[in-house]
Image: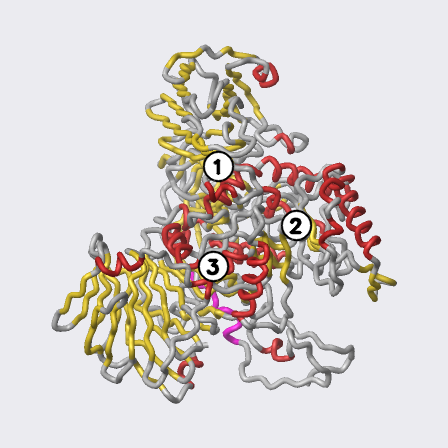
Amino acid sequence: MTSVLKDNQKQNYLSDLCQVIKKKDYYELIFKNNEIGKLYIINDEIFRLIIQPKGIEELPSVPFSCTKIKQNQKDYFELSKLLITEETFIIRNQRYSLRIQKKPALISIFDERTNHYRMKQKQPLLFQDNCTTETLTQNDNEFYFGCGMQNGHFSHKGNTVQIKNTNLTGLGAVACPINLFWSTAGFSELRNTWSNGIYDFGQQSPTYSSIMHFCDIFDNFYILGDNPAKLLANYYQISGQPLFLPKFALNLGYISDLSSKKVDNTSDIAINKQNWLTAIEDKIKLFAKKEFPLSWIIPDFKSKATFDINSTKNLSDYNINFGSENLRDNGTFGIIQLPMNNTDNFAIIDNLRNMHNQLDHQNQRIWLMTNNGWAGIHTYSATVNGGVGGEWEELSAQITSFLGLSLSGQPNFGNALDGEYGGGNAQVNLRDLQWKIFTPLLFNMDGEGNIEKTPFAFNNKITKINKAYFNLRRRLTYYLYNLLKQAQDGFPMIRPLCFNFPRETYNYTTRVNKEFMLGDSLLIAPITNGRENHEGLSIKDNIYLPNDRTVWIDPFTGKKFPGGFSYDQLTFSSWHLPVFIKQGSIIPNSLRDANIFPCNQETAILYDDDGISRQYQNEQFATTKIDSSLQNKTLVISIAATQGDFDKLDLQQPTYLTIFTDNHPQNIIATKNNEVINLVETNDIDTLDDQTSGFSYIANFNLWPEFSEYTKSNHNIIRIKLVSQNIKQDHFKLTINNFTYCNDVQMHAITDSALIIPKDFEIVPKSVTSKSMTVRWSNVPTPINDHLTADIELNGIIHTNISGNIFTLHELQSNTKYHLRIRNRYLNKVSEWSENITGKTNPDPLEYAVKDIKISANLKSTLEMPLESLIDFCPASEWLSKEKSQQIIH
């Protein structure tokens, strides 16, 4: 891709900087060859730089999505200072200085507080025929994110990405480009253009990054922040905050075209208005009968017919009668389906803006959906895709796609359960639904293929498991809704491990790109392949649980895992998705109800509002702060009085806490408004509900009772009820002495000289591929050999729970050197490590693919899937002909 830059004949680097003048509201930059520059100080952490080459008179039209600048930017400009040295012009604000070297003209941003550079240009801006390129210095430990839905990876170091919609999903495709990237060095860049681009984050050379767009003028926002959330929040200051979806959007939806019906599975015939409404009602009734009540429906997906919005007014009442909640008519949300060949970035956003403005007079929250994007898409729309579906590879690509969108400022997205087309594989259907329960939007997209796309399309066993997960989704609605609110401030719902655990370099690698955090509390590691053992249990390798000081709890079973390890050979029944709760989590169930997994100092702000209107923008919402502190076996929990108000807020609702513990509490001291209150102990939760205030200790508690048919949990909890006359006035404090949780988990192994080091540790000859290598070893016979497992350290990360004497390490990077060593483990005791061995994975097979192939066919191609797709080195692209034939390609 970088060859695009080299092939241009006319190349002009930005000339030397001669003068900087402080104007009325911007700095003017004058260069030797008459290029014109303007620097705007938006605020302390946002700069905008515009540079026009000679001969280009007008500024580009500014995308409306990038111009929501606060009115007080002039104050920041006036407070800035211009300093001049012999070599550099320095523009200084309160914390940062933008340094522009004179000869050559190089721009850098220096953090005066931490005394280091956030960003440095490696060479002057390059102006070519219809493209501009910025080249940045790249550090060894610097990683890059953003750029939208780059299917296949979300961490871009060492890769080149296209800022261009390829109209494809899958590995190598770009379904929703966003012209924003950010770096772990603490800066972000938003190129202010509608033109496509190519970003090389070190593929050509690991020492620099090349940011190119096909436009004549350089117009760029530099955004600074101390962490990813701050960078995204500052991006929202320019582009606007994301949509805050209504609460009903979090539950099950259905997308289809019910305006026609198939005849002989080949052609469609239109149906009249009344039959259309009947078809909608029948679909709602079917889902309710199957105990999958719908919360929203789009009945005119891809339909050419005009749907009468007024005719849907009775649907809400109809839907509620059949067990669904909050069905909205088609006037409060919609779906934009652009022609597949429409790659006009301006048109995409402009269409959304126009529809957004049409609905802006309503008090209800606006909810639009589209399958495309550009910078600012989050302000107007959620991003949804169908995908092909039915293949394991789709699951992996969608996980990384979601992470990429999250880190690009788009927190609202979803992909159809089991895809839009394809399907037929029950295990893929099941595993796909399981992990998508923990994503922002949950919906089926039906009617596009030959296979039914519903959660009850397969046998009773699959349907029953799907139903349990659907009910779990409803249980988690309040937690998910709180995450939607946090996304307004730059904390996306779906996050890669590096977002929550930034100090672990491993979390930036492709080794962990198939797991994610749901907020701060839940780690999800989806099953993404069909590997099974002889008992039919799914085998999951490479589940990395971060932070060697953290315990992770399986919510289904109560089993606890120490962090800092990559777990291999874990097995999971078909109902069991690998989910882990981080110790220290406070997970809300309502405004005054939370599950607490105590550890050290933790704080949570529980949020609620009416869930549907925009009155939250007028301070119509409520919050409750919960503090939990576990120090020296003393647990102290404080529940503050609720702040704020909104319509229908129950001021007399009780406060509930579910505190996870190792054992029965010796004593609980409770205060209400600093006065001691008596807590009556009851034998069970049902009896507790009849008390005014009290507690109950429950052993073998099932956190998610939807799965009680499949597993017996061994959680121990203290359930507490506190009655309040007015939650806005009453605050509570609990003190539990001699309290422990996860105290039985051994966080660090003990080296035992009696355990013998494994022998003959080696890489199996001819086992190495571009993504895997197999190792083997032997052990001296001992009485405990049947109980030994192995730990294998791979480039500093310990893989544990490995049985047998041979193991294949999967999901490795191609053409990469790995250092390995091994030790034996017996319970919490380990042997010494073996000597290191070294292996290297093979190059990517695509590197050996024949290039410069000429291809032709005797059939015409569809516009969206041309013949060239067969030889474009993009795994996601395919050729689709308009006709059928047995003799095609030459």
The answer to whether marks 3 and 1 mark residues whose Cβ atoms lie closer than 8 Å is no
| Horizontal and vertical percent position of residue 224 | 32, 57
Q: Nearer the viewer, mark 2 or mark 3?
A: 2
Q: Is residue 188 above or below residue 473?
A: below
Picture layout, residue 542 above or below residue 353 = above
Looking at the image, tell me whether mark 2 or mark 1 is earlier in sequence order: 2
Please tell me whether mark 2 or mark 1 is closer to you in this view: 1
Graded by Cα atoms within 10 Å as few (under 14), some (14 to 19) or many (20 or more), the crowding at tag 3 reads many
Mark 1: secondary structure: loop
**Is residue 824 a member of the stretch shown in magenta?**
no
Kindly identify the residue that appears in the image at 26 percent across and 85 percent down: 33
Q: Earlier along the polypeptide chain: callout 2 or callout 3?
A: 3
Residue indicated by mark 1? 621
Q: Are marks 2 and 1 in contact (CB under 8 Å)?
A: no
Residue type, label 1: Phe
* Disc 2 to disc 3: CB gap under 8 Å: no
| Horizontal side of residue 351 vs 407, given as left or right | right
Tag 2 residue: 443
> In the rendered image, which quarter contains the C terminus?
bottom right
Q: Nearer the viewer, residue 100 or 759?
A: 100
Magenta extent: 839-848
Image location (x, y in percent) of residue 410: 49, 55
Q: Residue 844: within the magenta?
A: yes
Numbered disc 2: secondary structure: strand
Residue 706 visible here: yes
Q: Look at the image and name its color scheme.
A: secondary structure
